[in-house]
């Protein structure tokens, strides 16, 4: 089958869940299908990762002179696009006509059996009423991410921006999802949410997966009283979650365990995260390999208060046999049971108390890690997930 895969952000992911999911599925699908990738990406060093190009029969990559994240230029651009009444996170790419021109040229010169729109962001590029058939692969309820961030934002201007973006993204989801021949979600929760827009027979769940060969338990013992969080620090839910942990939860843990240490591992940490750094808190920035940090951790923490979809970071930690303490929202959509595969806690006192308990109880920690590893190793390797994806698109 000839597939056209449309996504933003370059070829290979840094360390964000949806991009990793796409890449791992594409790596498997390329064994069975002829895939053309259309992508657009910020025109900055290291933002395009050409090592992924071997997966595709053709790559059309459009570099864009996007302003830097949270720069004055980005704020000015946001203000200009505000009047359009459309979602900034979608429109910021199509402000540049070269994206549309390149896509139209590709469609005029090639024929495909199926188009996969990866995330909702490229949806305005696509003529949804013409052939071939089209799949919209959602990795989150995007409007819900911004709505949840609105609820926890403190700055009134940023709070308004989040509210506005949640409203415009909700309109986009209501507009584009019903136009797709098939909508893929990553959890039953997302599937149920989108059922208000899309007929049930056109909604399918693609489970979250993990590379169980790459992420394996290591023989070296973890460092006592050490916690880790992994994820892109310029992704708003991660930024908020790490700040929330560092400001509200970690001080409570330190009162019980003064020698406790916390590693925040992920690229592009903003000033708010860098300000947390101390003798007890390590903010790494970009790392080549997150596994050594996961290996040294006694506990992996996922203190998220916003976001949507499912968190691959949890499956990665579980695959390495790690005990995980997460908020309920952080583990949303994952097939895990509290007390068996993971520990769930929501308010700061409860989260800190559960984390301290797992740090101190080696036997309980090891039991959680073994059950977690068994769950993902037996059911959620990427080859199995990709086979289900393949069966779905063929159907």
Image (cartoon, grey):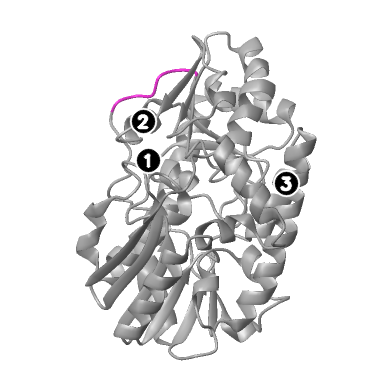
Residue sitting at x 72%, y 28%: 348
Residue at the far bottom in the pictured view: 131
Q: Is residue 23 left or right of residue 134?
A: left
Image position of 8 with respect to 297: above or below: below
Does any portion of residue 291 appear in the rendered image? yes
Question: Circles 1 and 2: CB distance less than 8 Å?
Answer: yes
Q: Is residue 305 left or right of residue 155?
A: left
Which segment did they paint magenta? 220-225
**Secondary structure state at the residue bearing disc 2:** helix
- Where does label 3 land, which residue? 161
- Where does label 1 land, which residue? 320
Q: Is residue 290 left or right of residue 57?
A: right
Q: Main secondary structure of the magenta part?
A: loop
Front in this rendered view, residue 186 or 48: 48
Q: Is residue 223 magenta?
A: yes
Find residue 269 and report its horizontal and vertical position in percent: 49, 30
Find residue 93 and report its horizontal and vertical position in percent: 50, 59
Q: CA distance from mark 3 to mark 1?
A: 38 Å
Which of the marked residues, 1 or 2, is nearer the chain's N terminus? 2
Quadrant that contains the C terminus = bottom left
- Where does label 2 land, which residue? 295
Kindly indicate the quadrant of the structure image that contains residue 44. top left
Q: CA distance from mark 1 to mark 2?
A: 7 Å
Which of the marked residues, 3 or 1, is nearer the chain's N terminus? 3
């Amino acid at each position: 089958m000839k597939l056209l895969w449309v996504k933003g952000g370059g070829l290979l992911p840094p360390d964000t869940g949806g991009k990793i999911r796409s890449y791992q599925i594409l790596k498997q699908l390329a064994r069975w299908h002829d895939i053309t990738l259309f992508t657009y990406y910020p025109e900055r060093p290291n933002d395009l990762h050409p090592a992924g190009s071997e997966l595709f029969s053709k790559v059309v990559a459009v570099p864009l002179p996007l302003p830097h994240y949270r720069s004055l230029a980005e704020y000015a651009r946001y203000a200009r696009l505000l009047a359009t009444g459309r979602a900034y996170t979608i429109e910021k790419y199509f402000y540049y006509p070269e994206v549309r021109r390149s896509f139209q040229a590709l469609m005029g010169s090639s024929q495909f059996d199926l188009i996969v729109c990866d995330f909702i962001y490229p949806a305005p590029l696509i003529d949804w009423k013409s052939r071939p058939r089209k799949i919209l692969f959602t990795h989150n309820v995007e409007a819900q991410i911004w709505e949840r961030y609105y609820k926890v934002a403190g700055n009134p201007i940023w709070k308004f921006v989040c509210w506005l973006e949640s409203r415009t993204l909700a309109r986009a989801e209501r507009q584009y999802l019903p136009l797709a021949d098939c909508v893929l979600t990553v959890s039953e929760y997302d599937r149920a949410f989108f059922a208000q827009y899309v007929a049930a027979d056109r909604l399918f769940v693609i489970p979250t997966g993990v590379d169980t060969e790459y992420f394996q338990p290591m023989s070296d013992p973890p460092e006592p009283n050490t916690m880790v969080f992994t994820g892109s620090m310029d992704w708003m839910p991660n930024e908020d979650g790490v700040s929330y942990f560092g400001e509200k939860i970690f001080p409570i843990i330190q009162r019980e365990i003064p020698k406790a240490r916390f590693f925040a591992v992920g690229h592009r940490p903003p000033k708010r995260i860098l300000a947390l750094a101390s003798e007890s808190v390590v903010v790494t920035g970009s790392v080549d390999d997150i596994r050594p940090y996961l290996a040294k951790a006694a506990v992996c923490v996922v203190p998220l208060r916003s976001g949507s979809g499912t968190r691959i970071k949890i499956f990665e930690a579980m695959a390495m046999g790690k005990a995980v303490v997460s908020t309920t929202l952080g583990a949303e959509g994952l097939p895990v049971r509290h007390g068996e595969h993971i520990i769930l806690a929501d308010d700061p006192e409860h989260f800190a108390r559960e984390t301290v308990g797992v740090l101190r109880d080696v036997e309980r920690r090891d039991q959680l890690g073994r059950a977690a590893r068994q769950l993902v190793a037996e059911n959620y390797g990427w080859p199995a997930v990709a086979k289900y994806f393949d069966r779905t698109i063929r159907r």
